[in-house]
Amino acid sequence: MNPTDKTMDKIIALCKNRGFIFPGSEIYGGLANTWDYGPLGARLKNNVKDTWRKRFIQERHNSYEVDADILMNPRVWEASGHVASFSDPLLDCKECKMRHRADNLIDDFDPNAHADGMTKEEMFEFIKAHSIPCPHCGKHNFTGIREFNLMFATERGVTEGKKTTIYLRPENAQGEYVNFLNVQRTMRAKLPFSIGQIGKAFRNEITPGNFTFRTIEFEQMEFQTFCKEGTDTDLYEYFKEYGRKYYEDLGIAPDHLRYHDHEKLAHYAKAACDIEFLFPTLGWGEINGTHNRTDFDLTRHQEYSGQKMDYLDPVTNEKFIPYIIESTYGLDRTVLALLCEAYDEEVVDAEKGDVRVVLHLSPVVAPYKAAVLPLSKKLSEGAMAIRDQLSKYFMTDFDETGSIGKRYRRQDEVGTPFCITYDFESETDGCVTVRDRDTMEQVRMPIADLASYIEDRIKF
């Protein structure tokens, strides 16, 4: 399809109508920027997790997965700097009272302005000099920029006056840092080694309503590599390339990905770069961030916890605090990028307005790997037996309602790569017809060969 015809509204409609993603708490009118993954969305999301685990944990040397708690000792967030400085530059429209992020206003107005490299004062002057209007009411009448902490705070304890303030974690990384010594000791890990984690994070930020691209609750696939100073630069460059290759292997076209080096670095960072995806309607947006965090994090946790975070080199007997190369993958954004990349409309008959909607998802992440379709309901018993057998190996759907053409279309819309038609001849010759979603080619094969045929085509 023409890229300009692919819009986020079409993606959202497909997700809601076909069971991928629903608005959160919808029967109560929803809650802004919260989304629930439906049966197909949950499966797609879990398939992406499986590819990440295979690529980053299973296939790599000295890579270990942890599952740290969402709630942590509040001193963790003091050490990390989140309590003091984890904030967004926000300003209010005096006319309609809507609150906006100053950097988003600038980047939406001029993508080449690079608000991430500006100070608060520079952002306010830019907004003022260019008379940037409020996106909600169109007026230009803002308050000054103020910093708002993004962490969700809650209280632990049952006795009034003896409660402790704790936080929902705004990132996963600290769970990996505080377990550095545990993992190194129990796994007898030698540098460089990595700790990965998949989990939820929460940020009380102003979100522009760009579907699942920016939400207050989200999931991250975090990967921290601990290394010796001097090897950090090469590892940083390596993981930039490694991340881009991962996305290409998931089916994203190379020209829909780009690097964006940070112009303004955090005080602890030696280098920082994002991988961005070209979203329909939204434009370029970050889906991965790779950072050279130096020895800042472990040094801070050593300072605040009183625990030595040294690594003892078994060869040189040298003690030092390792550097960290962080590579974080936004799971929700990755899922959204894959849906956007895969969405396609193929004109079958222009005169009749017949358009085939298809998700060209990689078979690796497709919710259903196959669907079994009996040509007639009279054949459902034999077809269901095939579905039950294939389901021992991978997710398999079954559909007996409507014409075979309509059932093909339904499976195309949800990205099922293979449709298996069980016909009257199947009863006698023990063969079925397998249709490929992308080429629409059909091959006849023995039922006994189905599982191996499909498994060979869904490997990652």
Image (cartoon, rainbow, N blue to C red):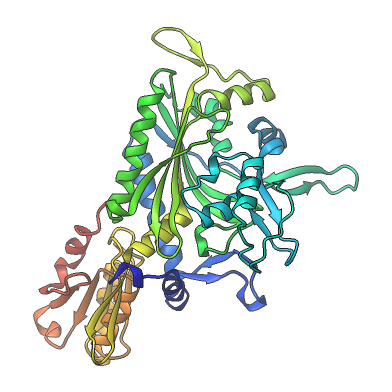
Give the camera-side residue of 333 and 314. Answer: 333
Q: Is residue 234 left or right of residue 177?
A: left
Tell me: residue 233, above or below residue 286.
above
Tell me: residue 148, above or below residue 78.
below
Dividing the picture into quarters, in which one does residue 54 lie? Answer: top left
Give the camera-side residue of 24 and 267. Answer: 267
Residue 178, percent across and down? 59, 31
Visible in this render: residue 326? Answer: no
Residue 421, percent across and down? 20, 80
Dividing the picture into quarters, in which one does residue 206 lie? Answer: bottom right
Q: Is residue 266 left or right of residue 356?
A: right
Tell me: residue 307, above or below residue 282.
above
Give the camera-side residue of 93 and 382. Answer: 93
- Residue at the spot 59% in from the left edge and 22% down from the top edge: 299
Visible in this render: residue 283? Answer: yes
Residue 165, percent across and down? 78, 43
Residue 226, percent across and down? 45, 26
Dividing the picture into quarters, in which one does residue 232 lie? Answer: top left
- Residue at the spot 55% in from the left edge and 54% down from the top edge: 218
Give the camera-side residue of 387 and 410. Answer: 410
